[in-house]
Amino acid sequence: MTGDDEGSAIVEFVTIAVLLMVPLVYVLLTVFAVQRAAFAVSAAAREAGRAYVTSDTGATADERAQTAADLALDDQLPGAPHADLTVDANGLTPGEAVVVTVTYRVRLPLSGGLATLPVTATHVATVDRYRR
């Protein structure tokens, strides 16, 4: 080994490590953000379905479902997000199935909000047969 080669292995190792670690950290941050949003959207769909089928009238059901979905998202995601909620229902007839779909657009890390990824969850809730 000659004197001018000393220390080059450390420089090469650090360079390769940085080139591999930066993309790996970005991918991990993205996966964590999408997974957190998936849990939040699933909870929001479930809570919106429960709020809808337990409403007294159809007029208040949509408002209650939207509020429940927004609260569930706000509980798990920062920044008071708004849920994009779709409810497929034929009213509050006992035994009726209500399909609730919640979509949230996840902002990818370090993109400044320019790149987003949609995350969607669907929940089917049934109106209680014995409701008055």
Image: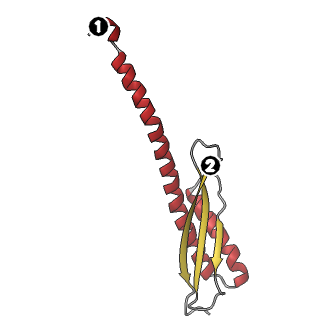
Percent position of residue 94, x then y: 59, 92
- Residue extending farthest to the top is 3
- Residue extending farthest to the left is 1
Please tell me how crowded label 2 is: few (under 14), some (14-19), or many (20+) other residues with Cα within 10 Å. few
Amino acid carrying mark 1 in the image: Thr
Q: Quadrant of residue 120?
A: bottom right
Percent position of residue 118, x then y: 59, 59
Q: Quadrant of the N terminus?
A: top left
Q: Quadrant of residue 41?
A: bottom right
Separation of marks 1 and 2 at Cα, in angstroms: 50 Å
Q: Residue at x 51, y 48 (%)?
A: 30
Up the image or down, 128 lies above or below 45; here it is below
Amino acid carrying mark 2 in the image: Ala
Name which of mark 1 and mark 2 comes first in the sequence: 1
- Residue extending farthest to the right is 59
Left/right of residue 102 with respect to residue 28 in the rendered view = right
Q: Residue at x 62, y 49 (%)?
A: 115
* Residue at which label 1 appears: 2
* Residue at which label 2 appears: 115
Q: Mark 1 vs mark 2: give the one in front.
A: 1
Left/right of residue 5 with respect to residue 24 in the rendered view = left
Q: Secondary structure at mark 1?
A: loop
Up the image or down, 19 lies above or below 112; here it is above
Numbered mark located on residue 15 in the image: none
